[in-house]
Image (tube, rainbow, N blue to C red):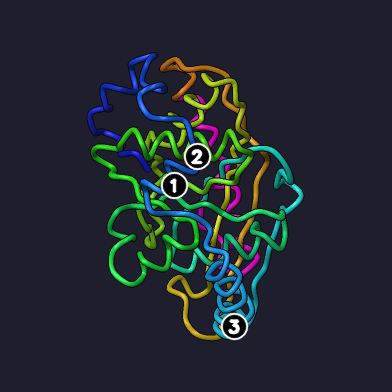
Amino acid sequence: MLGSGRPRPSFLNDELWLKAVPSSLATRASALETGINPFWAPLAMVVTQDFALRGFFRERIVLGRHHLPMQGPVLLAPTHRARWDALMLPMAAGRRVTGRDCRFMVTRTEMAGLQGWFLQRLGCFAVDQDKPSLTTLRFALDLLANDQQLVVFPEGRINRDDEPIVVEQGLVRLAQLALRQGVQVPVVPVGLAYNPNRPAPFSQAAICFEEVLKISGRGKEETEHFNQLLVKGMKAAEQAARMAVGRPMECL
């Protein structure tokens, strides 16, 4: 989610940056005005999973669920094909399945207006893709250090047109920063697919989880290698999801 091709924030090169903000998860959640609301979160789960998804899609397929870690920190790295993705992920990997919520790192535009008000109370939090704040990044790291499940869309935007998958640098940087804190974070490539491509009432939806990836270093070569593996995993997951809804890719 942190932009690729943009200047990397200088604090990411500073070994001391991790100490720049108080380490309390609750304090940072308050500063970002985010958190799992005990009223809205259960209600939203019922509304979205039992009514919205079931009422809109005639079939919702989940593949590769055995690849989901059931404990410890995890980064979910999904393809981004529709706004429905944000509902499909909690259905397939959320509280009813893993016993924990999906904490989404989203763009500021997605946190605007009524949608943003609702998302904040479901534990989503915004990141400025051009200038990610210390508080936001430390909050993401604290979530991982507290064995939470964090969702980051590596493409950074919705891609509906079968364009090649291009990942931004935010996810790998986050995993590297967590590793520097002694937290090894499994990264799960995820693919989502719909038939038709733009979801319509009574259409099909599928989500597929691929094998876990783990980052082992910080250098440029390691970063590039990890991103290549991530793209490969996301492609494989999306191909499986698309085949499940009868809309396979012409080529990988």
Which of the 4 quarters of the picture holds residue 229?
Answer: top right
> How crowded is the residue under tag 1: few (<14 C-alpha within 10 Å), some, or many (20+)?
many
Residue 42 covered by magenta stretch: no
For residue 29, the mark is 1
Q: Are marks 2 and 1 in contact (CB under 8 Å)?
A: yes
Q: Is residue 83 left or right of residue 212?
A: left
Q: Tell me: residue 194, above or below residue 110.
A: below
> Considering only order in the chain, which callout, 1 or 3, is on the residue closer to the N terminus?
1
Q: Residue at x 58, y 50 (%)?
A: 190
Q: 59 and 215: which one is in front?
A: 215
Residue 109: % across, % down: 28, 58
Residue 189: % across, % down: 58, 44
Q: 158 and 231: which one is in front?
A: 158
Residue 237 covered by magenta stretch: yes
Q: Is residue 62 left or right of residue 39?
A: right
Amino acid marked by disc 3: Phe
Amino acid marked by disc 2: Leu
Q: Secondary structure at mark 2?
A: helix
Q: Secondary structure at mark 3?
A: helix
Q: Nearer the viewer, mark 3 or mark 1?
A: 1
Q: Residue at x 56, y 70 (%)?
A: 39
Q: Residue at x 48, y 69 (%)?
A: 84
Q: Nearer the viewer, mark 2 or mark 3?
A: 2
> Considering only order in the chain, which callout, 3 or 2, is on the residue closer to the N terminus?
2
Q: Which residue is mark 3?
A: 51
Residue that lies at the very extreme toward the right in this rendered image: 66
Amino acid marked by disc 1: Ala
Q: Which residue is mark 2?
A: 25
> How crowded is the residue under tag 2: few (<14 C-alpha within 10 Å), some, or many (20+)?
some
Q: Tell me: residue 117, above or below residue 106.
A: below
**Range drawn in magenta:** 224-252
Q: CA distance from mark 3 to mark 1?
A: 29 Å
